[in-house]
């Protein structure tokens, strides 16, 4: 048996038998609001090289800056910061910033959880929770995020200065 398969089996056993109780292994993806306890994890994801490369600001974020940003974010009514969890473990984040009646979405998946379709699932879930129009800005050539935006129902509106502007109109709820 290969090492990966052995690890997978051990993980499954660990999840199924916790203190003698059987727990379901169901790959359930959920979104919950972020809180101060998530600050360290969010900073690590933000400073991951791929995340920095995809961001408008590519500089490393310092802990003090991040603490200030978290406090502002959690207090603001026009910003929703969510943590996506797979079977209760944090695997990514989606943020929505409201401006002029439209929510701008941005997203990051934890480096070790990438390539499993999780960004598509979590961003589509977030998009379904917002009835007002949504938008996203994606650097040209960022193929994965283009697929993510399209899966959430957004369409390319325009390209400007190496940035693709994606948008979905208001969601019809009836
Ligand atoms: C971009 C990112 C969110 C993608 O997360 P992920 O969970 O790996 O994405 P998914 O597995 O849902 O894949 C989404 C789609 O992109 C495709 N894809 C993934 N990586 C790709 C790559 N490097 N090149 C081309 N396509 C890619 C997948 O095949 C999938 O396409 P599909 O519709 O054919 O299935 C993740 O890599 C990340 O967090 N990067 C750093 C932060 C970032 O770039 N944020 C977005 C800023 S706009």
Image (cartoon, rainbow, N blue to C red):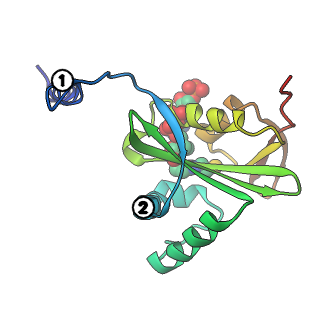
Q: Who is closer to the viewer here, 61 or 15? A: 15
Residue 96 coordinates in the image, percent (x, y)? 69, 51
Crowding at mark 2 (Cα within 10 Å: few <14, some 14-19, many 20+)? few
Q: Is residue 127 left or right of residue 115?
A: right
* Residue where numbered disc 1 is placed: 9
Q: Nearer the viewer, mark 1 or mark 2?
A: 2
Q: Quadrant of the N terminus?
A: top left
Residue ID at (48%, 32%): 29
Q: Find disc 2 in the rendering and name its residue.
A: 37
**Whole-percent x and y of residue 3?**
14, 29
Q: Quadrant of residue 19?
A: top left
Residue 161 screen position, x and y as percent? 79, 58
Q: Mark 1 and mark 2: span between their CA atoms?
A: 30 Å
* Whether residue 56 can be seen here: yes
**Apparent side of residue 10 relative to residue 126 in the rendered image (left or right):** left
For the point 83% across and 50% down, which residue is it? 102
Front residue of 26/8: it is: 26
**Residue at horizontal 77 percent and vertical 50 percent from the top:** 103
- Mark 2 residue element: helix
């Amino acid at each position: 048996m290969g090492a990966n398969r052995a690890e997978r089996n051990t993980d499954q056993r660990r999840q199924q038998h916790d203190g003698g109780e059987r727990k379901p292994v169901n790959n359930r993806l959920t979104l919950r609001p972020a809180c101060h306890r998530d600050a360290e994890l969010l900073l690590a994801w933000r400073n991951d090289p791929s995340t920095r490369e995809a961001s408008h600001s590519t500089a490393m974020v310092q802990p003090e800056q991040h603490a200030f940003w978290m406090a502002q974010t959690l207090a603001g009514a026009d910003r929703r910061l969510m943590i996506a969890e797979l079977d209760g473990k944090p695997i990514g984040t989606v943020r929505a910033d409201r401006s002029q009646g439209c929510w701008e979405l941005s997203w990051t998946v934890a480096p070790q959880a990438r390539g499993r379709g999780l960004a598509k699932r979590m961003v589509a879930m977030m998009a379904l929770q917002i009835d007002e129009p949504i938008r996203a800005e994606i650097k040209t050539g960022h193929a994965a995020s283009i697929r993510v935006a399209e899966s959430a129902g957004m369409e390319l509106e325009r390209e400007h200065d190496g940035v693709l502007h994606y948008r979905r109109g208001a969601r019809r709820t009836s």
